[in-house]
Image (cartoon, grey):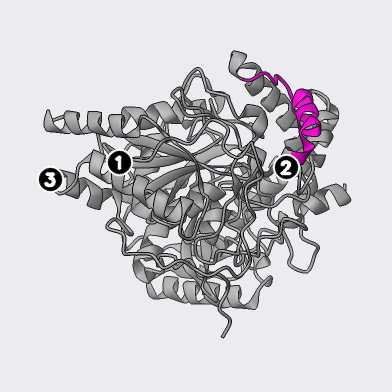
């Protein structure tokens, strides 16, 4: 779930994973161990694009698919078949996005069951019969595997559904596949390449194929952007929903921690982890969030969500939500890229035209101090939380703790670590229990800097409803030799605080999407959705990818 973005001043060194350590399906289902026999091919820079025929469901929405099923034009089965064929044409062949790691062999049967229910007059809700893709670190008690992209868990099948999977099934969604991710949610190495896993290979950005889709929910981002499904679920510890959403031209919601249960999801950090929607529109993201949210006895953090769970976000979807809203501009996240800054200034002008009062600047002055204490907390929590998860898997997963995974990786270095190592794993393994003074000190510092002296203080000082900032820079080239080249980002304050953020497409830089983030206080999810919707309706920036082979520079 982790994608550690630069949290502070553009004049200071980027606090990437690297610097943290230096400074302190009609088709048959995929096999259980896709990619184990040989390393997946690395995309060739500048390869010719494959022309794509028009796709019947291009830019379809949940509402348009529901209307199609109501009218009889479509059934859940026919929609599922269309998306499975799209995966064959775009993901497996053609541009070869490589975003879907496994397809559900029972997808057609499930879709037919939803069709039978519809004919009998039972429609469970907005997601009834809707095909949804989920990230391959979310447990499903079916014939799909949950591997976090690792060969060590390539044969692992969960004994029970994750809570959010149970919610999706109850809502009538068709879980028809799992998406590739940055292996172990980008928390294995200081030199990792986002979107690469040993099991799934390298996912590519559908806008420009030699560019990175960002991580760790890279497969979900690329797949939904390329119209392989109408909606997908990602997970985030720091940036892993909002960064791939921004880089792939999507709406992504990183909810308040505790609004969406984490039980049954391969963890990094119980302080920061959350799942969330990744879609092409705010309306669809809101519909998916309403289904994912809920109080779960297996996740204590959701206890605080009582009174905050929203079953229908429709009242928040007000095109006039920006009128009279006071919005603060977190300028300390600008300055990484002049073209991105121009996109942001155009977005600010659009909000002013929509009636918002802009307070500029409204900086989160503590943001640049968050890197070291955040990473310390993540190292401690990763070891404890992952060991707990692995121990719960039973006989299908023979590796019961982090130490065993480290040994497995070393024994299978040629397949698991051909491009980058496991420095983060090793550092986490060296950490002690959560009762350690170092952990408690770091966690207290995180809460003070991110909440009390961070987002909360900034909102109060400037009397603003929400803060805005560029979600990230344009996607960087895929580089397995050197790893990721982060180009700025604003995810860390909301990630460390556990507060919500919503990213919306804001513009393009040489054909590469750039997102705008709305950041707010705890439990302000509905308000941020309203602001994001109003911005989306005022600008209508999203356009589908064209699978360009490389960036076209004027």
Q: Give yes or no for residue 413 being in the magenta stretch.
A: yes
- Find the distance from the CA under tag 1 to the CA under tag 3: 15 Å
Judging from the image, what secondary structure is the residue with disc 1 in?
A: loop
Please tell me which residue is depicted at 62% across the width and 66% down the height of the picture. Answer: 473
**Bounds of the magenta segment:** 397-414
Residue 353 on image: x %, y %: 39, 75
Please tell me which residue is depicted at 48% across the width and 68% down the height of the picture. Answer: 506
Residue 476 on image: x %, y %: 65, 65
Quadrant where the image shows the C terminus: bottom right
Identify the residue position indicated by label 2 in the image.
446
Identify the residue position indicated by label 1 in the image.
130
Give the number of the mark in front: 2 or 3: 3
Please tell me which residue is depicted at 78% across the width and 35% down the height of the picture. Answer: 425
Q: Do the residues labelled 2 and 3 touch (CB within 8 Å)?
A: no
Q: Identify the mark nearer the N-term, 2 or 3.
A: 3
Q: Residue 320 carries which label?
A: none
Placement of 206 over or under 233, stated as above or below: below
């Amino acid at each position: 779930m982790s994608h550690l973005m630069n949290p502070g001043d553009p004049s200071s060194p980027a606090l990437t994973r690297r610097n943290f350590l230096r400074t302190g399906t009609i088709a048959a289902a995929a096999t259980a161990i896709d990619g184990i026999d040989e390393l997946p091919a690395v995309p060739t820079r500048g390869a010719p694009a494959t022309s794509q025929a028009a796709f019947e469901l291009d830019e379809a929405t949940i509402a348009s698919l529901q209307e199609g099923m109501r009218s009889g034009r479509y059934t859940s089965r026919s929609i599922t078949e269309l998306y499975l064929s799209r995966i064959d044409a775009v993901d497996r062949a053609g541009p070869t996005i490589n975003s879907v790691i496994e397809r559900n062999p029972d997808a057609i049967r499930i879709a037919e069951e939803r069709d039978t229910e519809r004919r009998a007059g039972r429609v469970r809700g907005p997601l009834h019969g809707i095909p949804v893709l989920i990230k391959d670190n979310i447990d499903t008690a079916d014939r799909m595997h949950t591997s976090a992209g690792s060969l060590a868990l390539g044969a692992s099948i969960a004994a029970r559904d994750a809570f959010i999977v149970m919610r999706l099934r109850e809502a009538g969604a068709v879980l028809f596949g799992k998406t590739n991710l940055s292996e172990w949610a980008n928390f294995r190495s200081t030199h990792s390449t986002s979107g690469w896993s040993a099991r799934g290979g390298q996912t590519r950005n559908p806008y420009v194929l030699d560019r990175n889709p960002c991580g760790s929910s890279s497969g979900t981002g690329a797949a939904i952007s390329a119209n392989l499904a109408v909606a997908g679920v990602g997970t985030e510890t720091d940036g892993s929903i909002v960064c791939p959403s921004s880089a792939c031209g999507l709406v992504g919601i990183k909810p308040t921690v505790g609004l969406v249960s984490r039980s049954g999801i391969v963890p990094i950090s119980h302080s920061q982890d959350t799942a969330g929607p990744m879609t092409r529109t705010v309306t669809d993201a809101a519909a998916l969030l309403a289904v994912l949210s809920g109080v779960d006895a297996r996740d204590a953090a959701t206890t605080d969500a009582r009174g905050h769970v929203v079953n229908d976000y429709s009242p928040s979807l007000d095109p006039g939500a920006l009128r009279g809203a006071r919005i603060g501009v977190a300028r300390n996240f600008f300055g990484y890229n002049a073209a991105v800054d121009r996109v942001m200034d155009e977005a600010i002008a659009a909000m002013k035209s929509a009636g918002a009062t802009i307070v500029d600047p409204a900086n989160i002055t503590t943001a640049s101090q968050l890197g070291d204490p955040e990473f310390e907390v993540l190292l401690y929590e990763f070891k404890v939380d992952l060991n707990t998860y692995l121990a719960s898997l039973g006989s299908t997963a023979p590796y019961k703790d982090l130490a065993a995974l480290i040994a497995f990786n070393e024994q299978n270095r040629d397949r698991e670590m051909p491009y980058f190592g496991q420095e983060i794993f090793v550092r986490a393994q060296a950490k002690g229990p959560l009762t350690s003074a170092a952990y408690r000190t770091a966690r207290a510092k995180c809460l003070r800097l991110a909440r009390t002296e961070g987002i909360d203080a900034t909102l109060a000082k400037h009397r603003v409803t929400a803060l805005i900032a560029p979600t990230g820079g344009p996607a960087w080239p895929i580089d397995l030799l050197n790893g990721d080249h982060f180009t700025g980002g604003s995810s860390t304050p909301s990630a460390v605080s556990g507060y919500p953020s919503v990213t919306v497409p804001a513009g393009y830089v040489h054909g590469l999407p750039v997102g705008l983030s709305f950041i707010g206080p705890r439990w302000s999810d509905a308000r941020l959705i309203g602001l994001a919707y109003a911005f989306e309706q005022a600008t209508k920036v999203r356009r589908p990818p064209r699978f360009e082979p490389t960036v076209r520079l004027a």
